Structures are given as C-alpha cells and as structure tokens.
Image: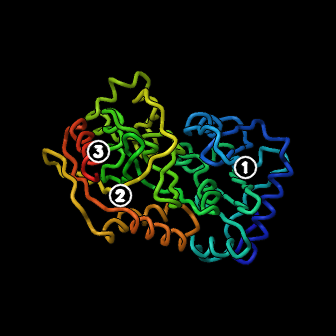
Amino acid sequence: MPRVTLETLPDYGRYLLAAAEDAGLRYPTTRKVSLPLLELTVHLGHGVLADALGHAFVEAGHDRPEPAACRVFIAHPGIHGIPEPARWGDAHFTEHGFAKRLAEAGLRGHYFHDLDFWQIYDPHRSVGVQLMASADAFPPWEPGAPLRAFLHWEYAARGMRLTHAGTLGIDGKGILLAGAGGAGKSGTVAAGLLNGLDSVGDDYVLIDLVGGVTARPLFSTLKQDARGFARLGLQQRLAEQGPLNWQGKHTFHIGDVTPRPVPAMLDIVALVMPHISGGGASSIMPVSRRDAMIALAPSGIAQMPGERESGFRFFSELTRLLPCFRLSLGTDPAEIAGAIENFLTRGLS
C-alpha cells in the first residue's frame, strides 16, 4: 500500500481528484442538494451515506444571484478506477501541518488515520473527493452532517463559515447558541422548537458577516441524550425512533417536532452561551467577549479541518459584532423557550 508524506501530499491530492473525476460514469448514483447559495452534486454508491444525503439537509429555495456549483465524489475501491487509500508515511502527523501543506498547493483536505479516510478539495474548481477503504468505511459522525468538511471549505472560500452552534429565533430575528458538548445547546434548540420558536440548525449553521450577522440552515438533524429526550417528551411525540447514534443519542429532524418551515435565514442579534444550572427559572445575563470567544471558537475550529487562522479571525469578528450573554437554563422546556422569546422581543429592543 502506498505511503503519503508531507512532501508528496499535494501530488497525492491531485491524483485522487483526477481518479475520482475519471471514474465519473461508474458511480452507482448521483444526489443533488440545493443549499444556500450553492448547488451540491454528489456522486456515490448506494447505502447509508446516500440515504443520509436524502434527509440530512434543509433544502434551500432558488437563490439570487444564481447559486454556485459544487461537486463531490464519494469513492472507494469497489468503483472501477478508484485506488486503495494510501496510508500516512511520515513519523508524525498534525492536522495543522497537513492543512498548511495542502493550502500551499491551493487545496484543502483532511485525513482520518483509523480508517485511512481521505477528503481532498480544490476550492478553485469546487471539486472534491472523499476516498474510503470501502463503501461503509466512514467515521461514525459522518451520516449526521454528511460532507460538512467540503461545505466548510467551499463556503470559507467565499468568506462565510460553517459554525458549530445552535440557533433559535422568532420573526426572522435570532440568537446563536455556543458552547462545548453538554452545555445544553441541543436541548435548548429542541425546547424552543417545541414551544413556538424557529431554528436554522442545532449543531452546524452557515454564518455570514456581510451586512450584519446572518445564519442559514444546512442540516436538519437534531440530537438528544436519553435524559433530554425524556424531559422534552419526545418519545410520545416521535412515533418512529431509529437506533441511537455513535454518541448514544437519539437523532431526529426539525420537521419531526414542528410543522413550521425552516426559515431561509435568521438575523442574529446575540451570542448566547447556555448553561445547565439546575435552578428554577431561566435567566440571561451579559458576559465578556472573551468568555464568548472561548465558548464558540475551539469547537468551531477543531471540528472544521483547515482554515485555522481564518477561523480565529472570523470568530473574533463575530464576537465583536454581537452582544454576548449567558443563559442559565431552568428545568421547564416551555419556560426556557418563553425566556428566549421574551429576550428576543423585548430584551434587545
């Protein structure tokens, strides 16, 4: 099996892109997804990822101007002309060094050691390849937000950012919910959706800083641990419940818990850090931009490979543009939603 080093990495990336494109007519299926400002075309085989592409996204309407086009090939050696994935050959591997070397060649990419899972993207041509050892040899988180790395690279090339955060809003105005895992973001989003609020995403949203701060939807997936699932009464609300995900959480979709359509975007007016306090009523208090940056940036950068320096600049500008708050969560989902609605309609007026 070939070995790739930092020195040979750009050549290997170009080789994979060429092999994936040359095999263009041999992929069993094609999926097209309309996303904000982007038409995504994916060539791949049948199976879990093809199914995920069918239901994991919030499809966008037609944007003006005409959306850009992006093409991704999900390849494995079972497709004629696709090579076996190479392995890393240098003694050491760092994500930053890997990304920097590719960026010097005008490419973006990610490598997941345990599965010899490669993702290479050419932002100048908006073409990418995801090479796996077999049709199902992908990391366990991939079906929940499929191809998020490619979307991150494509949007980053145009000054936007795929951000690890939740959202809630009303009448087109919303908040961005930031924090590490376990802070209560997903539960807060679900509580809001169940009690009359809107959301453009629970885990990853597209943020644009031109003309203010706006958030647009990409993925429709929501997730909850067993305690949150029970507290929100979701076992009665969701007739069909699939298997738990790789984190042992229930996964479902925005449309499963609210009949309202997902807004095309929300104008974000505040950055809010949820905190499980265990107290009675919810409360929202100002915090420093430093605390907000610490809550927002680390996961937003670690979960989006490459673009590290631009990520810090982006999140620094985001926290400069928005007032920042801590939301101490009460125990009643309806009360939490009411506190956020009151904050949006009265607290910032």
Q: Nearer the viewer, residue 162 or 66?
A: 66
In the picture of the structure, the residue carrying the numbered disc 3 is 345
| Residue 305 sits above or below residue 227 on the image | below
Residue 333 percent across, percent down from the top left: 25, 37
> Disc 1 marks which amino acid?
Ala
Picture residue at 50% right of the left edge, 61% below the top: 209
Which is more foreground, mark 3 or mark 1?
A: 3
Q: Mark 2 and mark 1: span between their CA atoms?
A: 31 Å
The first of marks 2 and 3 along the sequence is: 2
| Residue 337 sits above or below residue 327 on the image | above
Circle 3 SS class: helix
Picture residue at 19% right of the left edge, 41% below the top: 331
> Disc 2 marks which amino acid?
Leu
Which is more foreground, mark 2 or mark 3?
A: 3
In the picture of the structure, the residue carrying the numbered disc 1 is 69
Q: Mark 3 and mark 1: span between their CA atoms?
A: 38 Å
Q: Mark 2 and mark 3: span between their CA atoms?
A: 15 Å
In the picture of the structure, the residue carrying the numbered disc 2 is 271
